[in-house]
Image: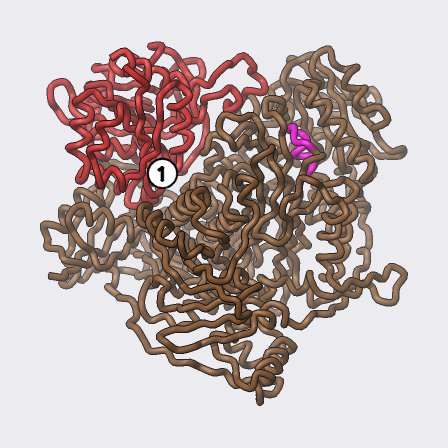
Chain colours: A brown, B red
Amino acid sequence: MNAAWQIEVRLAPGVDDAVGHQVEGNLGWIGVSKGLSVKTARQFLLVGDLDRARAERLARDLLADPVTESATVHDHASWDGRRAASVTVYRKQGVMDPVESSIRRGADRLGCRLDHVRTGTTYEFTGTVDDATLARIGSGLLANGAIEDMKVGVVRIPDVRSPSAGAFGRREIPLRTANDAALEKISKDGGLSLSLEEMKAIAAHFTAEGREPTDVELETLAQTWSEHCKHKTLTGGVVYNAGRPDEMRFSNLLKETIKAATETIAHPMCLSVFHDNAGVIAFGDDDALCIKVETHNHPSAIEPYGGAGTGVGGVIRDILGTGRGAKPVANIDVFCVAPPDMAATDVPKGCMHPLRILRGVVAGVRDYGNQMGIPTVNGAVVFDDRYVGNPLVYAGTVGLMPKSAVTKEVRPGDLIVALGGRTGRDGIHGATFSSAELHAESETVDSGAVQIGNAITEKKVADVVLTARDRDLFRAITDCGAGGFSSAVGEMGAECGADVVLDAAPLKYAGLSPAEIWISEAQERMVLAVQPERLDALLALCRDEDVEAAVLGTFTDTGRLRIRHAGVLHADMDMNFLHDGVPKTAREASWEAPAPQPDPTVAPGETGTAILRLLSTPDIASKEWIIRQYDHEVQAGSVIKPLVGTRHHGPSDAAVVAPVLGARRGFALGNGIAPRHADLDPASAAEAGIDEALRNVVAVGGDPSRCAILDNFSWGNCRKPDRLGAMVRCSVACRDTAIALGTPFVSGKDSLNNEYLADGRTIVIPHTLLVTALAIVPDVADCVTMDLKAAGRSLWQIGVSKEELGGSALARLAGTLGTHAPRIDGARAKATFAALHAAIRKGLVASCHDLSEGGLAVALAEMVLAGEIGAEIDVDAAPAASGTTLTARLFGESLTRFIVEVAPGRDAEFAACFAGLDAARIGVTTEKPELVLASGGRRLASLSATDLERAWRPSLSNILQSGISASEAH
Amino acid sequence: MATPKVLVLRCAGINCNEETAHAWNMVGAEAEQVHLNRLLESPGILDRYAVVSIPGGFSYGDDIASGKVLATELTIALGDALRRFVDRGGMVWGICNGFQVLVKTGLLPGTLRDGHRVAATLTWNDSHRYEDRWVHVRLDGRLCPVVEKDGAVIELPVAHGEGKFVTGTPEELAALEAEGRVVLRYVSPSGGKPVYPENPNGAMGDVAGICDATGRVFGLMPHPERFLTPWQHPRWTRERHRTEGDGLSLFRGAVRALKGS
């Protein structure tokens, strides 16, 4: 007999309700006065062959903790479920809820078969509050309308079932006779994001074929030709500053800048670059490392938790789908958001408060990475008002694979096998959505584009893929990312052809149209090309590990993509047109240097105050609140952790991981990002980004001569010449810097259209280039950290300080852009990195820290606070270009500079490493944990390690932990 | 006794199996990673092993509560087999999520000497956040054979959101302590009473790890398998005296006890 029960699980009396307290603390964000107290309860709606006794058994033995919780069982049919002063939140029907399958599994074991499970959370309020306020609290703090429903005053979760199956015939879209306006309307109404030129090209192609395209064909083209998948802007033609002395012309910007650098360098470590899902470099004789960094910006703006989580899930699948599969061994996350203490009144209509976004994306990265068992070891957070409507979420993964698995091939006759999660209606049009601009209605219009991940499903998929690889059970693999099956099968079959039968795809629920199945971006799916004789072994392995697999069809030698569903042919397309038919863009670009602004100055007597202020700004302040929520040690390969020093509280320059258990070879992972330099000159942002990423990995012991880099551009609307001009300038500088340093780009990605339209005002993000560096560490026992180690040792500055305060943290604090953004001396930088690495390998370096935001003063402060050892510094002794002001020596952000604590008695050897380069002894370490800076015989500042730590460590964590009060919010 | 064989359990969401197997192999045991489904198909394979080691991770996503679904599977499908395994001298280890699983099966803490079944759970950290950090713990070797040096203070990493050990009553905790069942206890770096984050989760009695009445069922929140070499320690670049990680001694102690029996 089928019955429905709702089980309510509450905390036992006396158990602290931490979730309730968190809500209480956050009421201020939406302007509700504090003083309300909040209690939470978990809700489970269970439908199945279940009498009351069994429902009570499930409540007791499965759902409620015997010590800390108690459960109440309600008969769903006869229960009105009313409760005053309550808000209940639950997933919308059809949105992935990973808990559902776990409850079914547990209930199965307890002898109860469940047909249907829904879960929710109730928040009960004590204090004076009306329903309108509750609704505001619900939508502002508790529920995300993109994925969740909520009810005020009712805790009963509706028993809504999945939609029933429909019949789907072949549907043709008449393009051949459509005029321009009609073509544009078809693209817009269908959410296809195809331009008029592209629609015309499609119409012309099908006119030549003598028929109309089907909806499935048109959707396939829209996915494959999307900016997200095709990178039309970067691979298109560009004319830069036409008619001016600095005019440049490109027929393929990406190929002639980023990729050209890699070709010129021709580094022997590069095994596979730019054509697979990740770049691959050699790691020892038999292994390889692959790396990919992706953005998941638009989904994270709408649903930070799900967007960031699926961003992580997606890039992990890129690694699983590189070559014949790599094991994910390290994760990277970088966020760009508006300041978390932004006044609520400054947040434009339709945008979430940046604090809510930041907390959400941290939780999303945390849960997905931790559950997958991949250490999140490296990251950064950048704050700028202009990210308010378009927060950026970069997620990256490093993979380890045998060299023998680097290549793959698809042969006609191979079976198309889909593996992993089921296909649902989630994530329809993600690829085309991410290629459009956001606006105040995006949250409601585009909720279908939001996906929720299930890390445990992906972990099972990863285990199966790696075992199947080692047993040689497939020939090729790729991930289902943007565009779903359409992109995965389309790419794999591009050179040969594919016949697909969509009926075989495992679905979350009936009722999906063929087009929906084909383009759904449901998570945790991979597509494999399987030799027919290996299929049984692969399916058996999948059964052993509880992973679903289905044969979707066959790769062919027809050069055509054919898709059938219920016996009907829904697509029969030319692969060449699909992949090469997109019209080339030709765009104009222009760039003009902005007017310089005055540089900031710090009076000598204000040096100490300026250091403390810089240390407490969110960009520089400790990210410990975030870092500690990531498991950075799972897999047991962590050698240099994100936090180092006497009490593990100082900021490490880079992470080092030894991914092979029992072996001492490893890799260092660092990143550089300098969007404020881009305000002055996008070329500086490229040079500073690459230099910083290199500085980070070299500072801990990474080998600069075996270092790969990645470019991730997040930009505004590049149909506008000024945005594209900045992109050109940045790309050219990427090429020149990479060549000068000998560090090849091995992978990259771009995310365009990061602009937000609100109240008639367009907010454009800063031009944001993230550079990620992956350097080989020959022996992890040689690694170095940034915390000062002992008193009585020499401190050296490596590299030369110049009058470069433009775009610096100090300039920002002073509210000015500054005059000169830092520029690189490529040849000298290469020699400096090599010399420092040699010194580290010789054991001459006790500690090393790179100079980045806040310059020399902040770097020294961090070394002192992390090591609880003092430093006495003569600022005048540091290498500097003539005429460099004291402010620039202390706070300027010139590139390729480090502070090194030299191992005792090794100064002469150390100096010899830097013959002909810029290096000078600038001071000594002291027992008393205090930073003392002097210039011209005058003491500029003396700050204790305690004072430095107090300024640096809690400021950002406090905001993230406690939220902002109502008075700050309004 | 010959080389002890260790069954390192795998299932959906367990993710510390490889480093756990590596740790067992480093101390002379022979670890095999076995999927739960194999064990459910043929519980008799337990006879081949001296140790069942349940690694850390997020079994079934820790949905409902940490370790709950796997605990339900083990209790219903393998409860009797596991009890027989322990009765014949087998050792059961649970690290982090594995500890949560063992507590939720009731195998830990199990009963007191007087037969009273202790009510206990591992619940949300006081911070209500997942946190990864290093802690100091003092070892109590009165009952549990894995402890090589009674009273020693060692360092290990913790990484969990639900690690706060709670018993139904304070008397139950006191009884566990009296019986020598609190094998690992959070202490301050100098060995004194810890405050947050030295006790990272607010556990009652600063409990970090416990054993059952036989001493052979052992669970702990810290991750000994993450501290096997000196380079895994967060301060190794400033403290160069270590020749091995502190976690190794627990695995070695277990193997020594098994070989001695």
The image shows residue B182 at horizontal and vertical percentages of 28, 19
Residue identified by numbered label 1: B14
Q: Is residue A445 above or below residue A542?
A: below
**Helix, strand or loop: magenta stretch:** helix
**Residue A453 shown in magenta:** no
> Does residue A45 lie above or below A290 as drawn?
below
Closer to the camera, A463 or A16?
A463
Q: Is residue A777 left or right of residue B115?
A: right
Q: Is residue B248 above or below residue A481?
A: above
Q: Quadrant of the N terminus of chain A?
A: bottom left
Image location (x, y in percent) of residue B75: 19, 37
Quick check: can you spot residue A368? no
Q: Indicate the chain on which mark 1 is placed.
A: B
Would residue B42 be found to the left or right of residue A547 on screen? left
Image-quadrant location for residue A70: top left
Q: Foreground: B163 or B254?
A: B254
Task: Estimate the x, y position of residue A343 in percent, counting from the top left.
Answer: 55, 52
Which residue reaches farthest front?
Answer: A533
Q: Residue furthest bottom?
A: A177
Q: Quadrant of residue A671?
A: top right
Q: Residue B170 falls in which quadrant of the image?
A: top left
Where residue A843 sits: x, y (%)? Answer: 68, 18
- Going by the numbered disc 1, the residue's amino acid type is Ile
Residue A702 part of the magenta segment: yes
Q: Is residue A639 left or right of residue A473?
A: right
Q: Which residues are magenta?
A: A694-703
- Residue at 54%, 76% (x, y): give it: A188
- Relative depth, front residue between A251 and A925: A251
Q: Secondary structure at mark 1?
A: loop
Callout 1 environment at 10 Å: few (<14), some (14 to 19), or many (20+)? many
Is residue A169 in sight in this rendering? yes
